[in-house]
Amino acid sequence: MMTELRYGIVLKDRVKVSDFMEEVQVACGNNRVILTNTMRDLNS
């Protein structure tokens, strides 16, 4: 059984996406993690 979770995130200026993904994968027990862009403008 797969569980799908969706989170809205904003990375700090000096954080790399690859570093974030690695940490999320470790936190999830090395399960599959998919990152998608919602193209939302968070400043409006």
Image: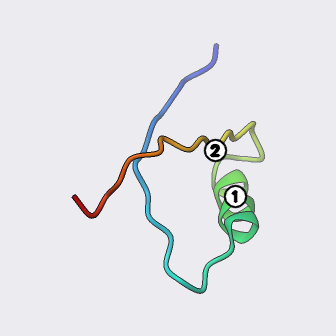
Above or below — where is 11 with respect to 12? above
The answer to whether 24 appears left or right of 4 in the picture is right
Q: Secondary structure at mark 2?
A: loop
Which quadrant of the rendered structure holds the N terminus? top right
Q: Amino acid at mark 1?
A: Met
Residue 11, image x, y percentages: 50, 70
Q: Which residue is mark 1?
A: 21
Residue 39 place in picture, x, y as percent = 47, 45
Decide: is 33 above or below 20: above
Instruction: Name the one closer to the observer, 29 or 41.
Output: 41
Q: What residue is rendered at 75% in x and 36% in y?
A: 32
Instruction: Kindly indicate whether the residue at mark 1 contacts the one at mark 2 (C-beta within 8 angstroms).
Output: yes
What residue is rendered at 53% in x and 83% in y? Answer: 13
| Rendered image: mark on residue 2 | none
- Residue nearer the viewer, 1 or 36: 36
Q: Mark 2 highlights which residue? A: 35
The residue positioned 75% from the left and 61% from the top of the image is 22
Residue density around tag 2, few if under 14, some if 14–19, many if 20 or more, within 10 Å: few
Q: Amino acid at mark 2?
A: Leu
User: In the image, which is nearer the foreground, mark 2 or mark 1?
Assistant: 2
| In the image, farthest residue toward the top | 1
Task: Determine whether 10 is above or below 1 in the image.
Answer: below
> Real-space Cα distance between discs 2 and 1?
8 Å
| Rendered location of residue 14, percent (x, y) | 60, 86
Query: x%, y% of residue 43?
Result: 27, 64
Q: Residue at x 62, y 19 (%)?
A: 2
Q: Quadrant of the C terminus?
A: bottom left
Which label's residue is closer to the chain start, 2 or 1? Answer: 1
**In the depicted view, which residue is nearer to us: 41 or 11?**
41
Provide the secondary structure element on which disc 1 rests: helix
Extreme left residue here?
44
- On screen, residue 43 versus residue 32, left or right, reads left
